[in-house]
Amino acid sequence: MIISGGSNIYPREVEEVICRHPGVYEVAVIGVPDPKWGETVKALVVPRPGTQVTEAEIVEHCRTNLASYEKPQSVELLPALPKNAYGKILKRELRERYWAGRSRQI
């Protein structure tokens, strides 16, 4: 769960909306540090092979399907997401670079 400005945001709900975009192959949603809100929503997206998708398209897709506080504040396009031997996305590894060096990792 991501807590942003006192609101509870469930990454799974955001991921389900983003996955409905035709240019998205895979997505992981994580909370990243924010000085004002505590955490903000960040979407890490793997585009579908042979398609072009932009960060702005993903945010606009979310704007029409999610509450304003749930939509990603940033989107990063990646070639692949880290996974374990069973194919589960390792969100812990995705979070590490954003939370490194902080005493509190929400």
Image: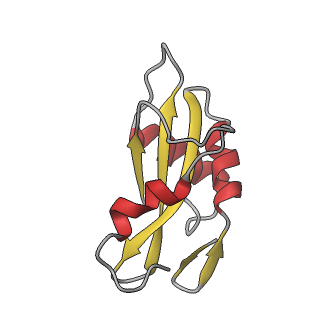
Residue farthest toward the left in the current orientation of the protein: 101
Residue shown at the point (56%, 69%) measured from the top left: 69
Instruction: Find residue 101 and report its image quarter.
Output: bottom left
Tally of numbered discs: 0
Position of residue 82 measured from the top left corner of the image (x, y, whole percent): 50, 42
User: Is 91 drawn above or below residue 106 in the view shown?
Assistant: above
Which quarter of the image is occupied by the N terminus?
Answer: bottom right
Rendered image coloring scheme: secondary structure
Q: Is residue 34 left or right of residue 25?
A: left
Q: Quadrant of residue 27?
A: top right
- Percent of width and height locating residue 91: 54, 55
Q: Splitting the image into 4 quarters, where does residue 9 fall?
A: bottom right
Q: Nearer the viewer, residue 104 or 28?
A: 104
Q: Is residue 82 left or right of residue 19?
A: left
Measured as percent of width and height from the top left, residue 62 is found at 58, 50
34 vs 72: above or below: below
In this view, 28 is above or below 3 = above
Residue 31 drawn at (x, y percent)? 49, 66
Name the residue at the front extreme. 85
The foreground one among 49 and 103 is 103
Residue at image point 56% right, 31% down: 24
Q: Residue at x 56, y 48 (%)?
A: 28
